[in-house]
Image: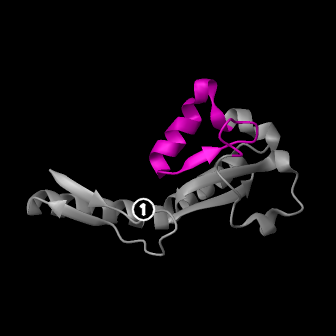
């Protein structure tokens, strides 16, 4: 058995105490630290993708979108999706200040994954643009 003590609401500490079998406590501590690191590295970025290309990038039944998310490790939200507003504001929102909101795609997850997804979205966007 492991006991977990976290600060009460309003307490200034962010300390969590684990008590119990040392091996189990060590495993829990490692998992908690891994989760904290992942959450600290999480970002929301935005990229301009013309609305006319959204359908092709998402694919039938979302298959292209799912493949891109699996390949990059980032989550991608197109305007109008249920999760679009829940993701939060992109940290590079100022860079897209003059862009039509319908063309702003949000990418969230670890920074490196987001950057990789944005690069792929840009390549897909360029390759699907008529010459």
> Does dot 1 land on a helix, a strand or a loop?
helix
In percent of width and height, residue 86 lies at 66, 46
Q: Residue at 58% across / 62% down in the picture?
A: 43
Q: Residue at 48% across / 75% down in the picture?
A: 12
Is 42 positioned to the left or the right of 101 in the image?
left
Crowd tier of the residue under label 1, counting other residues whose Cα lies within 10 Å: few below 14, some 14–19, many 20 or above: few
In percent of width and height, residue 93 lies at 76, 64
Queried whether the magenta region covers residue 71, the answer comes back as: yes
Q: Residue at 69% across / 44% down in the picture?
A: 84
Q: Nearer the viewer, residue 78 or 27?
A: 27
In percent of width and height, residue 128 lies at 72, 42
State the residue lying farthest toward the bottom. 12
9 relative to 117, above or below: below
Residue 63: quarter of image: top right
Give the magenta range. 57-85
In percent of width and height, residue 57 lies at 66, 38
59 relative to 99, above or below: above
Residue 129: quarter of image: top right
Is 99 positioned to the left or the right of 109 in the image?
right
């Amino acid at each position: 058995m492991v006991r977990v003590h976290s600060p009460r609401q309003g307490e200034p500490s962010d300390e969590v105490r684990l008590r119990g079998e040392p091996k189990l406590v060590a495993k829990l501590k490692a998992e908690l630290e891994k989760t904290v690191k992942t959450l600290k590295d999480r970002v929301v970025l935005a990229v301009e993708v013309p609305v006319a290309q959204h359908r092709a990038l998402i694919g039938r039944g979302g298959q292209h979108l799912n493949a891109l998310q699996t390949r990059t490790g980032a989550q991608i939200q197109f305007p109008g999706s249920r999760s679009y507003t829940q993701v939060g504001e992109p940290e590079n929102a100022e860079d897209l200040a003059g862009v039509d909101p319908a063309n702003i795609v949000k990418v969230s997850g670890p920074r490196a994954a987001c950057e990789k997804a944005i690069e792929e979205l840009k390549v897909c966007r360029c390759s699907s643009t008529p010459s």
